[in-house]
Amino acid sequence: MEVPRPYGTIDKMTSGQIDFHAFTGVVIAEFPSLKEDLESDAGLPYLQMSGLHRFTEQAMNKEDWQTVRRCLALLERFLKFGDSDLQNAVYVSFLEHIDTSGKHWPTLKSLMPPIVLNAHANTQAYWAEHNRAKSPSKAKNSNRQK
């Protein structure tokens, strides 16, 4: 018997269908243990998304890859069907904080659905360009030394 999903099935969803209010319900439906944390951060969606990131990190540290897969599947849903505010929260409060130098990065990367992997790559590229633009060029530095 199929358990009904309160926010529809993925094949019936459209972009922009999941907003921050729905986000909370979707996460709690998947991970009831996060209910108290999400409700304590009600109205603070970026903190709620950070909570999902911390939960995912804890699962990685325990090498609970099934839970990590479920977290990544949620991110996939949020990127595909979330409104622009929710998608931004995924980028800012989750993807930007992934430790690509940690021992679990190769496994995490291999588990990421393509849309999540692409979004993470875009985040990394954005920050690399941002940091290049902020730092003085080698030419300017060499002129200052003369």
Image: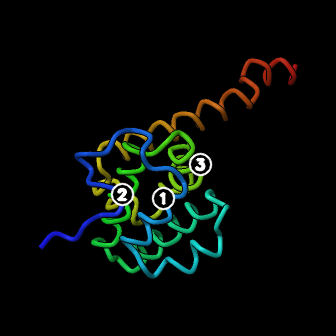
| Horizontal arrangement in the rendering, residue 44 relative to residue 98 (left or right) | right
Q: Are marks 1 and 2 in contact (CB under 8 Å)?
A: no
Label 2 secondary element: loop
Which quarter of the rendering shows the C terminus?
A: top right
Query: Which residue is tagged 3?
Result: 92
Question: Where residue 13 appears, x then y in whole percent?
Answer: 31, 45
Q: Amino acid at mark 3?
A: Val
At x 56%, y 43%, the residue is: 88
At x 16%, y 69%, the residue is: 2
Question: Where residue 64 appears, x then y in whole percent?
Answer: 33, 77
| Horizontal arrangement in the rendering, residue 145 relative to residue 72 (left or right) | right
Q: Are marks 3 and 2 in contact (CB under 8 Å)?
A: no
Which is more N-terminal, label 3 or label 1? 1
Q: Amino acid at mark 2?
A: Tyr
| Horizontal arrangement in the rendering, residue 79 relative to residue 144 (left or right) | left
- Crowding at label 3, few (<14), some or many (≥20) Cα neighbours within 10 Å? some
Query: Which residue is tagged 1?
Result: 23
Q: Amino acid at mark 1?
A: Phe
Foreground: disc 1 or disc 3 = 1
- In-front residue for pair 95/142: 95
At x 53%, y 46%, the residue is: 91
Residue lying farthest left?
1
Residue 82, quarter of the rendered image: top left
Label 1 secondary element: helix
Q: Are marks 1 and 3 in contact (CB under 8 Å)?
A: no
In this rendering, is residue 97 above or below 80? below
Which is more N-terminal, label 2 or label 1? 2
Which quarter of the rendering shows the N terminus?
A: bottom left
Foreground: disc 3 or disc 2 = 2
The circle drawn on residue 7 is 2
Label 3 secondary element: helix
At x 60%, y 30%, the residue is: 129
